[in-house]
Amino acid sequence: MTEPWTLEIHEALPDDWASVPAVAIGGPAGPAGLFVLAERAGARRRFDLHYLEFDYRHPPQATFWHGWFAFGFGGRAILHREADGAAVEIDLGCYFDEFLAGDAYLLATSGQGIVKLDTEGRIAWRNDALGLDGVLIFDVEDGIIDGQGEWDPPGGWRDFLVSLETGEALPIEDAEGDDDDDDDS
């Protein structure tokens, strides 16, 4: 089994990484906003992340999944294939929030929704109607994504269930309704 890549995000480039060739990710030419440093079994890869002028600086994330280096920052998720350098850039329409990886999918959440990517880096589906200022995933089980979207900041979170297969919102059962019927007063 191949040793996994270890990835670290830095705001400043450590001196011992200056000679490692950089792959520029996103944004215009100019100074990088962040540096992702990847190491595996003595091999080193360096990715310089370039923000766009209007990008919101929410915490970035970098991961390695199914042969792809995945970077989430600003309003984008960007995939860079290890084998051939092919790149896929997904405009999230809002700030990037987090990645959640499964065996056959990578979910990228934004302030408004979820994008599901397949192992080839293609968008399987997207649902941009899950929140206004944040989307959290708590669990993915039996083909259902359980999470919350913030609709009325601060703190106005609403539960959601989404089909992992289609991205469609599923009905949420009202768990509180049954308790009120048992009142005998």
Image: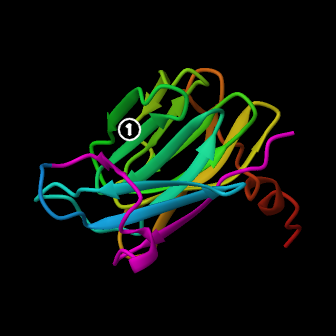
Q: Is residue 161 above or below residue 148?
A: above
Q: Residue at point 87% right, 39% down? A: 1
| Residue 102 horizontal/vertical position (percent) | 72, 38
What's drawn in magenta, residue-wise? 1-27
Q: Check if residue 22 falls in the magenta segment.
A: yes
| Residue 134 horizontal/vertical position (percent) | 42, 60
Q: Give the position of the C terminus as an image quadrant.
A: bottom right
Q: Residue at point 37% right, 63% down? A: 19
| Residue 2 horizontal/vertical position (percent) | 80, 41
Q: Residue at point 39% right, 41% down? A: 78
The residue at which mark 1 appears reads as: 128
Residue 35 seen by the camera: yes
120 and 15: which is toward the camera: 15
Q: Secondary structure at mark 1?
A: loop
| Residue 137 horizontal/vertical position (percent) | 62, 53
Q: Is residue 111 left or right of residue 63?
A: left
Residue 110 seen by the camera: no
Q: Is residue 8 left or right of residue 34?
A: right
How busy is the neighbourhood of tag 1: few (under 14 within 10 Å), some, or many (20 plus)?
Answer: some
Quadrant in which residue 32 is drawn: bottom left
| Dot 1 amino acid type | Asp
Residue that lies at the very extreme toward the front in this rendered image: 19
Q: Check if residue 132 falls in the magenta segment.
A: no
Q: Is residue 179 above or below residue 64?
A: below
Q: Is residue 50 above or below residue 78?
A: below
Q: State the scheme by which the image is colored.
A: rainbow
42 and 94: which is toward the camera: 42
